[in-house]
Image (cartoon, coloured by chain):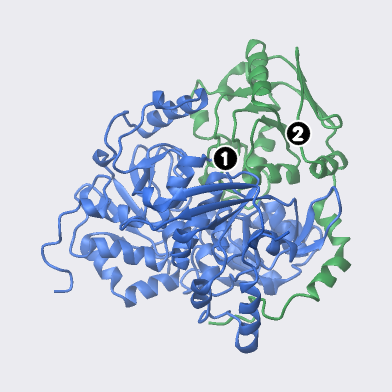
Chain colours: A blue, B green
Amino acid sequence: MGRTLSEKVWDAHVVRHADGEPDLLYIDLHLVHEVTSPQAFDGLRLANRKVRRPDLTIATEDHNVPTFDVDKPIADPVSRTQVDTLRKNAEDFGIRIHTLGDPDQGVVHVIGPQLGLTQPGMTVVCGDSHTSTHGAFGAIAFGIGTSEVEHVLATQTLMQARPKTMAVTVDGVLPDGVSAKDLVLALIAQVGTGGGQGYIVEYRGEAIRALSMEARMTICNMSIEWGAKAGMIAPDETTFSYLQDKPHAPQGVDWEAAVEYWKSLATDEDATFDREVVLRAEDIAPFVTWGTNPGQGIPLSESVPSPDDFDTENDKVAAERALEYMGLTAGTPMREIHVDTVFLGSCTNGRIEDLRAAAGVLAGRKVADGTRMLVVPGSGRVRLQAEAEGLDAIFKDAGAEWRGAGCSMCLGMNPDQLAPGERSASTSNRNFEGRQGKGGRTHLVSPLVAAATAVTGTLAAPADLPPVAVPANA
Amino acid sequence: MEAFTQHIGTAAPLRRGNVDTDQIIPAVYLKRVTRTGFEDGLFAAWRNDPAFVLNQPEYDGVSVLVAGPDFGTGSSREHAVWALLDYGFRVVVSSRFGDIFRGNSGKAGLLAALVEQDVVEKLWTAVETDPGTKVTVDLENKTISAGDVSAPFEIDDYTRYRLLNGLDDVGITLSREADIAAYEATRPSFKPATLPAKA
């Protein structure tokens, strides 16, 4: 019988298989950041162990760094210690590191792809749940805890039970103004936050094939938000042409050999999945969350739901609690919700295409009074590219803040945080209570919705905006 | 890691589903570079609420947490497990766990016991009726009991074996060094390396 994409990649990485035990899986690329690694390096030191493959390991600073004044020492001494600890660990163990101010510093999941280190058929891990992002290349990529970080540093392997397989097929063509973020938010609302648990998911179908690499990364990034072990998309010409000119892409004969192998990874015609979900792209509209988990989302055109709209007691209670935390009243049209802060960035939507999409909406327009907008490129290189294209000028002219690279307001850890009660429209991935700062209220949105919301000050899509009076480049 | 065979202790009922790791420990508490001292961050936002279960004196000294479905979803932070351990928990019971959280628990020595939701409901009732109820968690036999409630729980065989024997994963894997080296010898030359750096 044929095999699926994930089965082929898994099988190619089994170092040791024994019945009744998890497989010992080889790891091709280990991404390291400052928050989940210090205790792992300490563990190595205590046991007098070294990093087995520094040449398959790369580190950067992203979660706990400021996105302004990056040329100055980090103000918070505890944060500075954590960042300094990573720098010292990298030096002591011979690991490549990209520090603040370096073009390849930035959100760890933006760095791997932009360097061409993330390639099809690989296994990629990181002490961060959004490692699923790299699955967009046809890699098995998943987040791990600090004990596992230590395990990979010491052995370049992980003990892993083989997950089940699931196909999410998206047929048809996405309507204009509907993006990958809308698609994945709509999917999570349908399957629930636990729907993917125990599965490696392969996203496939016409609508997925039509997506750019960056849009595919947005989809795979959110796999963890519905509980999946990993999300993957089969490599194709879009993947190969994205990779071709990246610094660490294979060269010459290696490129030929790699592409031939990558082409062989697609799921076989006669392979079967343990579970299948089918969506129609035409049914998907701009989508936003109203609650405190990523599954609590609805089309932007709808109104805040009532707890009575839900079938199970668990969902009713969760909705009631979410409405209270979010300060929302059932029946309020989503478009009437005022937003204090718009955050454009993160490993979900902090790449150049996301910035281009938002800039396209903001050109010739202004951020509404009473709303602020933060634009945080995913990496130093994304920032430089945006500046070369003049996107920074569009954001600044509109009244948005143009920042340095990092995780920023995706999580309430660095200086970019919501104040208690403050409401955001955020292109990030989690609307959990307090995620963006204690008491902060998060609506997850696409970059297009984020930009339109910044202009109106209430949740909006670009189609809601009046035409720009004078074209931006006239 | 210390071996885990059986645990007896009192339990707190956490009547919430979808308790993600940002709720278990908010990101602002993750700045520490040590492996201990995370108890302050445990459920930090909720502990400001006097009505929160862990603020009730009758649940002082609990070591078993009985939570709603989808406990430990979201972020991979192992700090969530450390915070629970540092606070004094040895066992968390739920009808569904986030994958990464469950894996981290097994590594750090916190038992994540998977049960049917009706067992969770019965345990909630038991420990709410009498907060002094002793909960017995037997890893050898994979059973949990409290008062009149007795039920099996699920845990994967390998994690159970490691917990029972207090084994260190890295040590086990390093004993397979020959297998790892043999695998490495077969890796194709087109696979990328981070070193030397290319711009």
C-alpha gap between disc 1 and disc 2: 18 Å
Judging from the image, mark 2 belongs to the subunit labelled B
Give above or below for A273 relative to B95: below
Work out whether residue A451 or residue A147 is closer to the camera in this orientation and state it. A451
Give above or below for A316 relative to B40: above
What residue is pinned by disc 2? B154
Q: Residue at x 79, y 75 (%)?
A: B186
Work out whether residue A99 or residue B157 is closer to the camera in this orientation and state it. B157
Q: Is residue A19 left or right of residue A375?
A: right
What residue is pinned by disc 1? A194
Judging from the image, mark 1 belongs to the subunit labelled A
Q: Measured from the top left, where is residue A187 in percent x and y?
A: 47, 46
**Tag 2's secondary structure?**
loop
Q: Residue furthest left?
A: A469
Work out whether residue A129 or residue B56 is closer to the camera in this orientation and state it. A129
Q: Is residue A427 left or right of residue B129?
A: left
* Amino acid bearing label 1: Gly
On the question of residue A354 being in view, the answer is: yes
* Amino acid bearing label 2: Glu
Q: Which of the 4 image quarters holds residue B36?
A: top right
- Decide: few, some or many residues near mark 2? Use Cα within 10 Å; few <14, some 14-19, many ≥20: some
Q: Residue at x 36, y 45 (%)?
A: A288
Q: Residue at x 35, y 72 (%)?
A: A386
Q: Measured from the top left, where is residue A81 in percent x and y?
A: 57, 58
Q: Is residue B57 left or right of residue A425?
A: right
Q: Measured from the top left, where is residue A130 in percent x and y?
A: 55, 55
On the question of residue A416 being in view, the answer is: no
Q: Which mark is residue A50?
A: none
Is label 1 in contact with label 2 (beta carbons under 8 Å)? no
